[in-house]
Image (tube, grey):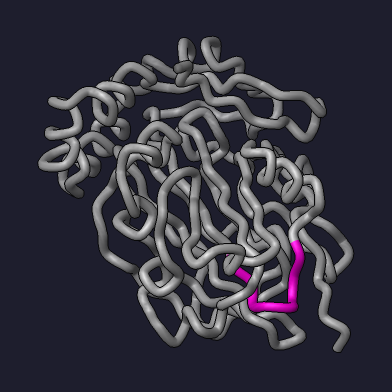
Amino acid sequence: MSSEIQYWDRKSQSYQIEKVYGDGAIKFAYENPFGRFLTAHLFSKHWISKLYGNTQSTKSAAKKIPQFIKKFEINMSEYEEKSYDSFNDFFIRKFRPGLRPFPKNPQELGAFSEARYLAYKSINDSRSLYIKGSETNLTELLGSESLAREFEGGALWIARLCPVDYHRFHYPALTRVVSTQRLPGLLHSVNPIAMKSVPNLIQKNERHLTILETPKGSKLAYLEVGALMVGKIIQSNCIPGQAYGAGREKGYFLFGASTVVLLAQKGTFRPSPDLIDQTQKGFETRVLLGENIGTNVTTA
């Protein structure tokens, strides 16, 4: 069976094959029996990922940037002009100002990451959530039974970032930070190959959970999910009690692939129809930062 990852590209309106960074290493870690043993007992530990992440902050790591750009056909004209002192410096590169506008309509949600999205009208379509082959439940995902009750039946978005992607994440709309906390865990890869190999992967990984409140009083649960070889998750703008506008940077991931999950309370927001359609067909949709991913459906 082919292990190619196919996704729907919203911009080109076509299916594309993903170019996977470290494809051989991922397959070894999650498809080879010895590799799976090493991953379970060594690779997924925090110190390994942070040690590897630290190597990406060295000047010598910057030497691989030109080859990386060429291999993955990264359009550097979209990013701010600067020299990069390390691979991590390049990894957290910023878009040019104004390049990725967010919706001006306050009833719309903008894409909080430039990534491949899955979207569900309700997280209660089945008794459990199935995130790209990985089964979990809402209480374990949020680390709280009371929060699980608050978000039961609401809409769900999962944005998977690849190492080649822009790795900053943003606020999808004008919201106020209610609370933020770290939920400890391991650091497995979020590649679909790993998702299919490790049961309950999402809630096993480290997560940073932020509860947001919209001007209408509805809440959003925003989770950054750590991953294999992600050195650190940085919260650059996330102060409890502070309000942030649509498109404001919330933070960024240092080296590695990562995932951001967004949940809405029942009856508040509905994902964009094209995201739901492709998810039902079994495909992620690549969405540019700031593009519409959902609409407020409350009548109040």
Spot occupied by residue 272 in the image (x, y as percentages of width and height)? 79, 54
**Quadrant showing the N terminus:** top left
**Quadrant showing the C terminus:** bottom right
- Write the start and end of the magenta stretch as one range: 263-270
* Relative side of 285 to 187, left or right: right
Spot occupied by residue 28 in the image (x, y as percentages of width and height)? 25, 22
Name the quadrant containing residue 220. Answer: bottom right
* 20 in relation to 109, above or below: above
The residue lying toward the viewer, choosing from 21 and 158, is 158
Name the quadrant containing residue 184. Answer: bottom left
- Whether 269 is among the magenta residues is yes
The residue lying toward the viewer, choosing from 116 and 91, is 116
- Whether 115 is among the magenta residues is no
* 103 in relation to 14, above or below: below
Name the quadrant containing residue 35. Answer: top left
* Relative side of 43 to 193, left or right: left
- At a point 71% along the width and 68% down the height, the residue shown is 245
The residue lying toward the viewer, choosing from 128 and 187, is 128
Spot occupied by residue 211 in the image (x, y as percentages of width and height)? 53, 77
- At a point 24% along the width and 31% down the height, the residue shown is 55
Residue 159 visible? The answer is: yes
- At a point 44% along the width and 75% down the height, the residue shown is 180
The residue lying toward the viewer, choosing from 83 and 263, is 263
* Relative side of 58 to 97, left or right: left
Spot occupied by residue 70 in the image (x, y as percentages of width and height)? 55, 11
